[in-house]
Image (cartoon, rainbow, N blue to C red):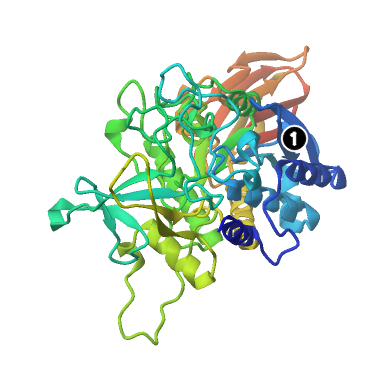
Amino acid sequence: MRLIVLLILSGFWSSLSAQKTYSTFPQLTTRIKDLASKNANLASVSSAGKSAGGKDLWLLTLSQGNPSSKPALLLVAGLDGSHPAGSETLLLMAEKMLNNPNDQVKDLLSKKTLYIIACANPDAWDISKGKFERSGNATASDEDRDGRVNEDPFEDLNGDGLITQIRIEDPSGTYIPSKTDPRILVKADPSKNELGKYLLISEGTDNDKDANWNEDAEGGVNINKNFTYNYPYFEKETGVYAASEAETKAVLEVLYRNLNIFGVIVFGPENNLSTATKYDASKTRSRIVTGPLEKDAAVAETVSKLYNTATGLKNAPAMPLGKGSLVQTAYYHAGRFGFGTPGWWPQLPPPDTSQKQKAPAAATLSGDEIFFKWADAEKVPAFVDWKEIKHPDFPGKKAEVGGLMPYARWNPPVSYLDDIATRHNRFVLDLAAAMPSLDLVNAKVETLQAGVNRITVQVINKGFLPTFADLGNRVKYVSKVRTTLNASATQTILSGKKTNLQPALGAGELVEYTWLVNGTGKISVTVTCPTAGTKTVELTLN
């Protein structure tokens, strides 16, 4: 039985593409380094830091020329170790961009920079060695706070090489089989006169006899629960304090040190791209802001439309932003736009018109039901049939092992990610094209009297998005729009500030500056903002 299921799981990860399985971490490292070495004019690789287990967090930088001198996007995947599909998708995106760059890609990298951390939690990466979903790093964790570490691990009770679930028939149970797919257990709804039939636990026994099952198994800290905004104290897989983990610090170091990062895109089990977070005034008025500001919510809606148009993906799952996540920390603490997407999710197969009975609409199905419909249609192994066992913690009761295979829910065979990478590259290219772009227009010099000139110039944002998030106006880690009159030693500014700092400029918004200057010869005006670029205009004083 163990051999059969392992063969099934092996088949789950296989595909017909050149890359047939999910990479191991050494293979991932080789792909990243090869990509940089073969495209040295457009890419470089460095280590952003080390994981708790001593593995490198590789930072792949895509840019033509000086990367820090251009507006940038930070793309991150693999924070949650249970989602390797995000890492594979992100690395495929980079490979597609560089291995055969089209004119749009070349134009992007000449004007913008992409910082890519494809695997931000490498300790959890090598899924081929794990029989259970591991989302955390190599940090030893005492999840139940009893002074012991990993004393209540998972156990493979049916010997199939996988850790799934156990359902126990019990009058106090709160779960019943789904009416749409009896393989799936759903919560009983008392308002519909539904009575629970099953208890549901993870596969294993209660080793420490505290009436909790497998609550202190090997697993470490989920990096996407360890960031600083809305950090979930004393919750499972969150670490001992915010940013306690080396991986978290490494990612934050990249974010805060590179002031040119306009926004962050995280590939993981969160989604605010398919449907943007709505503006709620009540969440913006308190001392601690807990919702996007009105202008930023409008930007998020614009980016969401870009995403849905570029990817063409339907039936997006509701995947709210979690506590302590990078997406939220990037926005609320670093003042950058933060976006999250799982990249891939199951698309419902077209309805079978030969069937007389109408199939249920996507809106009426749960995420698991949609997934199993997809898996059945695509013939992707994803479920272990329920099989009765004798469970030592439930003598005399019917207990069955089975359920969803580890990693199956959000990690399809690699072959499905090739198209997903292409779709998301379209989105990244469209987003980069919409990013802010500063320009100086209508610059003029008027001679008022001998040696005295009035200089007038307008600063305009020619992009379709603001120079930075409106929340960035309140955050010290965001550089404002800086307009400087570069006068020489023989020129005197009689009126007007030499340097002017401007809050965020919206799409098409402009601001005008005027100076009175005594002197002659060449003089220049420079406008710069790390997230929106730099522009200089040269003028002549009479």
| Residue 497, quarter of picture | top right
- Amino acid at circle 1: Pro
| Residue 412, quarter of picture | bottom right
Q: Quadrant of the N terminus?
A: bottom right
- Numbered disc 1: secondary structure: helix
Q: Nearer the viewer, residue 44 or 289?
A: 44
The total of numbered circles placed on residues is 1
- Can residue 537 be seen by looking at this rendering? no
- Can residue 413 be seen by looking at this rendering? yes
Above or below, 115 relative to 230 = below
Q: Position of residue 457 (x, y in %)?
A: 61, 32
Above or below, 473 relative to 467 = above
Q: Nearer the viewer, residue 68 or 201?
A: 201
Q: Position of residue 66 (x, y in %)?
A: 78, 34
Please tell me which residue is depicted at 29% across the width and 59% down the height of the picture. Answer: 177
Q: Nearer the viewer, residue 406 or 58?
A: 406
Please tell me which residue is depicted at 50% across the width and 57% down the height of the picture. Answer: 345
Mark 1, residue position: 67
Q: Is residue 12 left or right of residue 385?
A: right
Please tell me which residue is depicted at 62% across the width and 47% down the height of the picture. Answer: 432
Please tell me which residue is depicted at 67% across the width and 22% down the height of the picture. Answer: 485
Above or below, 350 relative to 196 = below
Q: Is residue 191 left or right of residue 242?
A: left
